Amino acid sequence: MKYFHSLKLTEVRKETPDAVVLTFEVPAELRKEFTFTPGQHLTLKTTIDNEEVRRSYSICAAPFEDTLRVAIKKIDNGIFSTYANTKLSKGHQLDVMLPMGKFSPKLNSSNNKNYMLIAAGSGITPVISIVKSILTQEPKSKVTLLFGNRNTRSVMFKEELEALKNQYLDRFNLHFIMSREKLDAPILNGRIDKHKLSLFFKYLTDPTYIDEVFICGPEEMVFEAQDALQQHGIPKKAIHTELFTTPGQVVQESTQVQKTFDSAKESMITIKLDSKTIEFPLKYGAETILDAAMQQGADLPFSCKGGVCCTCRAKLVEGEVDMTRNFGLEPDELEAGFILTCQSHPRSEKVVVDFDQK
């Protein structure tokens, strides 16, 4: 399977002082493969200073718009984000992996739902795709969006969101929340956290009418929002999250209990990919299955290596593993035997991992 395709940039547009929107030209023969659902992401790959760099960015267009684009916000010491904001221009080629991810609503034109979406900063990128898709594909559904930023100047897609609000006056409630700019309504000042959500539920939104919630942004905001929603009676299964991290950032440790093990003990690892098989030994206390397989020459899909993006997701067919972190796999995926190979270490004499099973 060819994971990456070289795509040309047809537009590089400055969205805010520290963010750009990249629009890709998708050849006719690849359009079917690049079909996506709202909320999915792309993994981009290029060479910067003689080093291969991969990063995942959410698609910020809706499927019906017939375009493929991502937005990239420049972060401090961010290799790829700095490169995108300062070096890329129309005509550049980037290697792009096919769309991935399950941060998507199951849309149906007959649905009559109340959705709440919560985003902070560049967490708006998958959320704007979801908002547009719900409003156009579910005419009976309503959407409330809480969008946190430092100030008005840093708000991505501000005009686009306000245009949607004007177009869907009765169905789209939009609230900008600023942490470093004072707005007229006190409830709109500060950060999105447990206290802020409690105020919203008290004065503006009745949580008992919320059917589904989608949250995307930095780790602290996502976890606080998730806790607040559950405390106000919204079931965990109705809350969907997408965690945004920066390369090298240490996210909150997983609550998964790690088993005791002999680090010198060895496992025989079998990797199945594109109907081919590779085998190699790996000690329990050594590197992850993903890193070890790549050292053996395997060309496996991956991006963040932080247990977030799920690009390295595969099916554990046989054996046992421990995952250091998991912030991407849903409970049903775990139950079905899927693992994140970037976080997995062997805990049995034999481990068989299949990348071909979806």
Image (cartoon, helix red, strand yellow):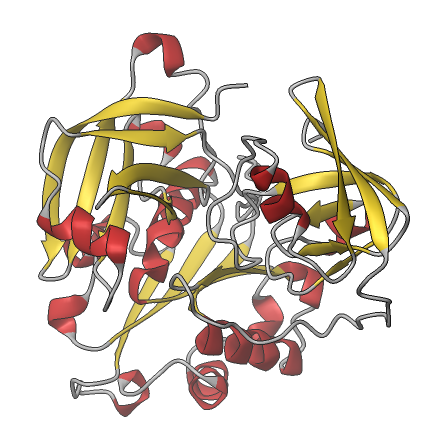
Answer with left or right where residue 169 lies relative to residue 3: left
| Residue shown at 41% from the left, 26% from the top | 4
Q: Quadrant of residue 154?
A: bottom left
Instruction: Using the rendered view, name the quadrant where residue 323 is placed.
Output: bottom right
Q: Is residue 162 above or below residue 291?
A: below
Residue at image coords 44%, 44%: 134
Q: Is residue 56 left or right of residue 27?
A: right
Q: Position of residue 358 (x, y in %)?
A: 69, 31
Q: Position of residue 284 (x, y in %)?
A: 78, 58
The residue furthest front is 264
Q: Is residue 77 above or below residue 184?
A: above
- Please indicate, yes or no, whether residue 206 appears anywhere in the rendered image: no
Q: Depth check: give the residue in front, 287 or 308.
A: 287
Q: How many marks?
A: 0
Residue 16 seen in the current view: yes
Quarter of the figure with the N terminus:
top right
Tell me if 105 is positioned left or right of 230 in this view: left
Q: Nearer the viewer, residue 243 or 75?
A: 75
Q: Position of residue 168 (x, y in %)?
A: 30, 50
Q: Residue furthest top?
A: 29
